[in-house]
Image (cartoon, grey):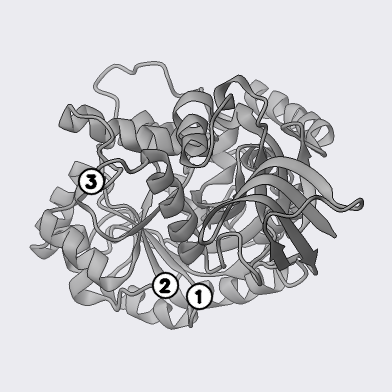
């Protein structure tokens, strides 16, 4: 199979009249400056697909339902209470339907793989399903229906606060002990065994939900796979960690865990310059979720000062858009600095190119896959419509600047994952059936 692009962003830069030969879901060959062959599928602008490194798929079903102000000051913690109420009602069928809708939207938005930070393990009473991997199986099924690449990150959650504080009733569906978590990881690997290109990592939820001894006990389960953790997301979390340990969350983690390239530190919003320096030195990826962090009022990661790897994720899925995540990441820094193009890095450099390249590389590292358009890499590809008004007379890096800052995912015409075309003219091939099931599910859940 061949794909021909008028212009494409390859691993080593932009090229014109690019032909990609695809075999077994990977890029087998690349030719530049060649005309399309009769059997080639033709497209305009070719870009590498981007990994969405942090998602809670089920939260797509409550998007837009937490925007009424409460009696006091709203925050992450008041939002979390509403999220727990939504979780109470979800069945395995519901999870599958909502996740499939979210994954269809991710593909339409240019995300070709998702890191599913999956903590909804048990039934409504907190009892294990007969199959420990029941909910993982539903996530895998949703990924299979949509065609998105899946890195599943089953969450270890055991406590309600630092120092092993007890959990509340609302958290019962998330909980495991280390032995049970080991069984859950094994069940999750079985659940994903038939899913092409799937990866299973581990995810200690946060330092407030995992004790030091438990963290030490579960880390060997990862082996060489990814390790993701929420950290330093809220100011209160930082203060509580200091009260418990005398150290800030990122400071404590770097001093007490073998943080390396396998790790993704999700959010890391409230960090010091020294912590950022040490994060970068460790090789860990900063997992940034600008849309959710803004929606929850969490704060702003000081990205301009960070010299390490980073990627983006849609987290709560209140809005699913690769372009919006990257745009808001830059705009947040602009508002903070009262300056423009702060993430570009050097004079005459493209801000969009800097953001996009970082998201491709950081997302791939965090989800344990290869990224970029190069021989041997997965054929995870996004095409933009060169006739869209936002791309008129644009070339090379101006294309990315216009995609991120002037257009958004309305510019996306096609998406291929593992060489299979899943999106045409901006619409996923299975959107109608997936959306119909999602509608039935939400109408029932929200009427309860």
User: Is 419 situated above or below 189?
Assistant: above
Are the two marked residues, 2 and 1, in contact with CB atoms closer than 8 angstroms? yes
The mark total stands at 3
Q: What residue is pinned by disc 3?
A: 304
Q: In this rendering, does residue 130 appear at all?
A: no
- Find numbered disc 2 in the image and state the secondary structure of the residue it sits on: loop
Closer to the camera in the image, 448 or 237: 237
**214 lies left or right of 378:** left
Q: Residue at x 14, y 58 (%)?
A: 248
Q: What residue is pinned by disc 2?
A: 262
Residue 128 point in image, percent of width and height: 61, 62
Q: CA distance from mark 2 to mark 1?
A: 7 Å
User: Is 386 situated above or below 310?
Assistant: above
Closer to the camera in the image, 134 or 14: 14
Q: What residue is pinned by disc 1?
A: 225
Quadrant in which the C terminus appears? top right
User: Is 211 situated above or below 75?
Assistant: below
- Find numbered disc 1 in the image and state the secondary structure of the residue it sits on: loop
Q: Residues within 10 Å of mark 3 (few under 14, many from 20)?
A: some
Residue 85 point in image, percent of width and height: 50, 34
Q: CA distance from mark 3 to mark 2?
A: 23 Å
Q: Nearer the viewer, mark 3 or mark 2?
A: 3
Are the two marked residues, 1 and 3, in contact with CB atoms closer than 8 angstroms? no
Q: Residue at x 59, y 31 (%)?
A: 409
Closer to the camera in the image, 77 or 340: 340
Mark with earlier residue (2, 1): 1
Q: Quadrant of residue 126?
A: bottom right
**105 lies left or right of 237:** right
């Amino acid at each position: 199979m061949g794909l021909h692009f008028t212009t494409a962003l390859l691993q080593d830069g932009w090229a014109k009249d690019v032909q990609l030969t695809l075999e077994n879901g990977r890029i087998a060959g690349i030719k530049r400056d060649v005309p399309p062959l009769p059997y080639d599928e033709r497209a305009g602008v070719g870009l590498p697909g981007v990994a969405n490194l942090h998602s809670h798929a089920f939260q797509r079903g409550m998007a837009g339902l937490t925007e009424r102000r409460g009696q006091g000051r709203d925050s992450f913690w008041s939002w979390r209470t509403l999220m727990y109420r939504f979780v109470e009602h979800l069945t395995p069928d519901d999870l599958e339907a909502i996740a499939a809708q979210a994954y269809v939207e991710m593909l339409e938005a240019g995300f070709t793989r998702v890191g599913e930070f999956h903590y909804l393990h048990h039934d409504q009473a907190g009892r294990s399903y007969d199959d420990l991997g029941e909910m993982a199986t539903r996530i895998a099924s949703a990924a299979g229906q949509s065609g998105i690449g899946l890195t599943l990150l089953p969450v270890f959650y055991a406590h309600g606060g630092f120092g092993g504080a007890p959990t509340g009733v609302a958290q019962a569906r998330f909980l495991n002990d280390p032995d049970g978590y080991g069984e859950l990881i094994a069940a999750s690997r079985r659940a994903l065994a038939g899913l092409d290109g799937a990866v299973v990592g581990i995810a200690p939820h946060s330092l407030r939900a995992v004790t030091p001894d438990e963290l030490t006990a579960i880390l060997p389960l990862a082996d060489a796979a990814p390790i993701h953790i929420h950290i330093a997301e809220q100011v209160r979390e930082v203060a509580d960690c200091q009260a418990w340990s005398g150290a800030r969350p990122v400071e404590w983690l770097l001093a007490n865990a073998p943080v390396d390239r396998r790790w993704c530190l999700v959010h890391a919003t409230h960090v010091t310059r020294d912590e950022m320096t040490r994060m970068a030195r460790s090789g860990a990826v900063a997992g940034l979720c600008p849309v959710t962090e803004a929606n929850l009022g969490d704060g702003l990661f000081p990205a301009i000062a960070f010299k390490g790897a980073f990627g983006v994720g849609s987290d709560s899925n209140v809005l699913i858009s690769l372009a919006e995540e990257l745009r808001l990441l830059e705009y947040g820094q602009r508002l903070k600095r009262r300056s423009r193009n702060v993430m570009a890095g050097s004079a005459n450099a493209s801000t969009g190119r800097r953001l996009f390249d970082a998201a491709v590389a950081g997302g791939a590292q965090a989800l344990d896959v290869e990224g970029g358009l190069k021989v041997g890499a997965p054929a995870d590809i996004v095409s933009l419509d060169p006739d869209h008004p936002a791309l008129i007379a644009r070339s090379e890096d101006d294309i990315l600047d216009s995609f991120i800052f002037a257009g958004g995912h309305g510019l996306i015409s096609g998406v291929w994952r593992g060489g299979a075309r899943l999106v045409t003219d901006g619409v996923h091939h299975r959107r109608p059936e997936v959306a119909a099931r999602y509608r039935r599910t939400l109408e029932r859940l929200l009427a309860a």
